[in-house]
Amino acid sequence: MRCILSFLLSVSLMLSSWLPVSQTEPQKPPAPEISVSAPSVVLMESSTGQIIYEKDPDTLRHPASITKIMTMILIFDSLECGKISLKDTVTVSEYAASMGGSQVFLEPGETQTVETMLKCISVASANDACVAMAEHICGSEQEFVAKMNERAKNLGMNHTTFVNCCGLDTEGHMTTAKDVALMSRELITKYPQIHNYCTIWMENITHVTKRGSSEFGLTNTNKLIRQYPYATGLKTGSTDQAKYCVSATAKKDGLELIAVVLAAPDHKVRFQDATTLLNYGFGKCQVYTDQAKEKLPKLAVQGGVADQASLIYESDFSYLDVTGADFSQITKELKLPKHADAPVKKGQPAGKLVYKLNNQEIGSVNVLFGESVKKALFKDYFRKALEAFFV
């Protein structure tokens, strides 16, 4: 028996040496060693939206004044569509003036411009200015909050529910670190002019009331604006239930990061955690952006009123790397069919531009039809025949 077992073992070892070794998937790199005290944090790169580091990103937490990021998104939405302008006059209601918490002490009947209100919100985190703007845009805070929730849903903020526009502790008013990163990215990428406001350190506004005019000083609640050399914003928040929060944005050498810190135990820890995250990101990340996409050819169209159609790129391409890769090794391959069959519609996908790094695909950009081509009818063929005959 021992001889038989010994023989079988030797045969097994010999066969195993002949068989090819199976290729296993490469192991994921270990989670980075980052020391942060806050229970929920997210570090995101803004151009790609890629999360670089996260800790408990989906736990529901009170957002405090970080809520105002969505409030400012809706203000800039209204500015972009022409519903309001920066010079418009906003009248403060009794309800808006009654807001507690952080405020700039607006009085009922007082008027300020939209731009001044934006400064009050982004710099001093003014609850009274938030509600005044909500009423100015939508007629009531309730209607404005409904739009906030609709906007959040469209951004994929699946765990967020807004109950007010300023962030005061209210039952059901909740979000997550990941959702805060999503809305922060929307604000700074779609409306980069926000940095003109949230980087103001100190500025005075003028109250004009029945008692006359008086100066009031705004001081930025985001101390990183002075303490961190690459800081560009964005918003702080603190309440009894939310504790201390910040969505900190910073830019260095063309790389823009968003560090979200929720429920830190004190104001120093929230800024320390944000600084730790940002330093890690700037030390680890590099972004490739294709600045020289090739001019697209026209694509032949069969059976259409035109023989070919123009093509356009759907978007720019960015790729975030944390491995120190050599971007000079990136290659591009344009994948298009030989022809398309009519009809084709403007904006319809036609193909894609594929990017590879070391022969591994890292992403692609859709190529779209830049114009529509209708299907040719008998009259179109007849017209073409006549044109050819008389030429």
Image (cartoon, rainbow, N blue to C red):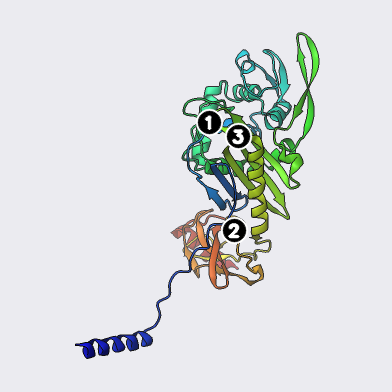
Estimate the spatial distance between the alpha carbons at disc 2 and disc 1, rounded to whole Å: 33 Å
Query: Considering the numbered disc 2 on the image, is that residue within a helix, a strand or a loop?
Result: strand
Q: Residues within 10 Å of mark 1 (few under 14, many from 20)?
A: some
Residue furthest front in the image: 2
Q: Earlier in the sequence, mark 3 or mark 1?
A: 1
Q: Position of residue 105 (x, y in %)?
A: 70, 18
Q: Earlier in the sequence, mark 3 or mark 2?
A: 3
Q: Is residue 225 above or below residue 295?
A: above
Amino acid identity at mark 3: Tyr
Instruction: Indicate left or right for 77 with 154 as reference.
Output: right
Tag of residue 244:
3
Residue closest to the far top: 210
Name the N-terminal-most of marks 2 and 1: 1
Question: In the visual, does 19 lie left or right of 66?
Answer: left
Query: Disc 2 marks which residue?
Result: 312
At x 65% / y 62%, what residue is drawn?
290
Observer-nearest of 354 and 224 = 224
Alpha carbon distance from label 3 to label 2: 46 Å
Q: In which quadrant of the rendered image does the N terminus lie?
A: bottom left
**Element at label 1:** helix
Question: Is residue 19 depicted above or below 342 in this figure?
Answer: below
Residue at position x 72%, y 44% from top? 231
Q: Front-most of 378 and 148?
A: 148
Quarter of the image with the C terminus is bottom right
Query: Residue 347: x and y, percent?
Result: 53, 53
The residue beneath circle 1 is 147
Say whether residue 307 is visible. no
Q: From the viewer's perspective, is the residue at label 2 or at label 1 nearer?
A: 1
Res. 312 in view? yes
In this rendering, the label closer to the viewer, 3 or 1: 3
